[in-house]
Image (tube, rainbow, N blue to C red):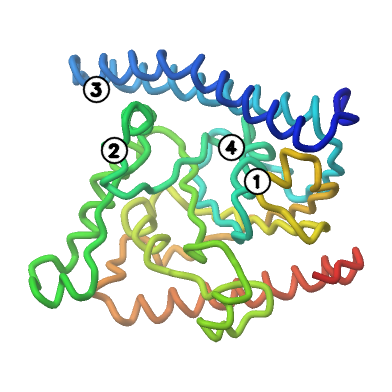
Amino acid sequence: MMLSFLPGPIKGSLIIFLIIVNTLFWMPILVIGAVIKIIFPLPFLQKSITLILIACAKNWTSLNNVFFWLFLEIEWKVSGLEGLSNDEWYLVNCNHQSWSDIPIVQRILNRKVPMPKFFLKKELVWVPIIGLCWWALDFPFMKRSTPEEIKKNPSLAGKDLETTRIACEKFKTTPVSVFNFLEGTRFSKSKHDKQNSPFQNLLKPKAGGAAFVLGSMGQQMRTMLDITIVYTDPKSEIWDLVCGRVHKVIVNIDKVDIPSEFNGKDYTNDPEFKARFQSWLNTLWCEKDELINQIKADNNIQH
């Protein structure tokens, strides 16, 4: 905020530069931790190293938040942070409008819940350096079989759930927040029209990823943090954010109890569970859509 008077492009360039420097500072520690975990695959050592690396990742997020505070003048209106805990397991969902959503979620949840972890495509583990860092932080990597692949090779049916179970196994003893954009991609008018989405402000939710997580970790994961972000400015891409063109962000967090009947079920091969889960998710989506309309009406947001 002290440097918010600077021109937008200068602020944006400085913030991105500082985030890169921050990343380069912590990256060697993550790489060394990853190498230790590879050389010494002892469970107690791996868990200890992972906790150290997670602390580094939280510090990385905290420093990024400081950069935002120094340069940006944003009015934050956040509700629903009460009762969050670092000792609980959470399934985290958020509507997805731009890449600004990720730093905003990191800002509001950092040190209030276990570090959010994203499901990543298996191929991303081979991204130089960063893939190794994700692996060291126990980000789950998985390969999804397409319907066409399963049709050609029926033995692949159910393999996705098994892959997810293996990826989530290490999360069963240490609390974690598994983050998932249920829309699967960023919202746009063209995507909305192409889908013929029944929701005014949202794309159709993709149930499979969340269902796979609950099938693997249902005994530990009893709460969904349903995050709704509304930007008061018409442009909210990441460059708009770091340049100071985003002036107010409204965030609502709903703590939703996950029905126990969804625990340990096979979304791929259990059509009855699949239908119930999709129905539950669609109900949540209707409520989320209404909430966004209400927030826009209360704040006179036209876009």
The residue tagged 3 is: 43
Measuring from the top left, give residue 282's x and y in whole percent. Answer: 54, 77
Q: What residue is shown at x 62% (from left), y 55% (from top)? A: 98
Q: Amino acid at mark 3?
A: Pro
Tell me the element at label 4: loop
Q: Are marks 2 and 3 in contact (CB under 8 Å)?
A: no
Q: Amino acid at mark 2?
A: Val
Within-10-Å neighbours for mark 4: few <14, some 14–19, many 20+: some
Measuring from the top left, give residue 234's x and y in whole percent. Answer: 79, 61
The residue tagged 4 is: 113
Q: Please state, as top left, top right, bottom left or bottom right, where the C terminus lies in the image.
A: bottom right
Q: Are marks 1 and 3 in contact (CB under 8 Å)?
A: no
Q: Please state, as top left, top right, bottom left or bottom right, where the N terminus lies in the image.
A: top right
| N-term-proximal mark, 4 vs 3 | 3
Quarter of the image holding residue 95? bottom right
Q: Are marks 2 and 4 in contact (CB under 8 Å)?
A: no
| N-term-proximal mark, 2 vs 3 | 3
| N-term-proximal mark, 1 vs 2 | 2
The residue tagged 2 is: 125
Q: Amino acid at mark 1?
A: Ile
Cα–Cα gap, marks 1 and 4: 24 Å
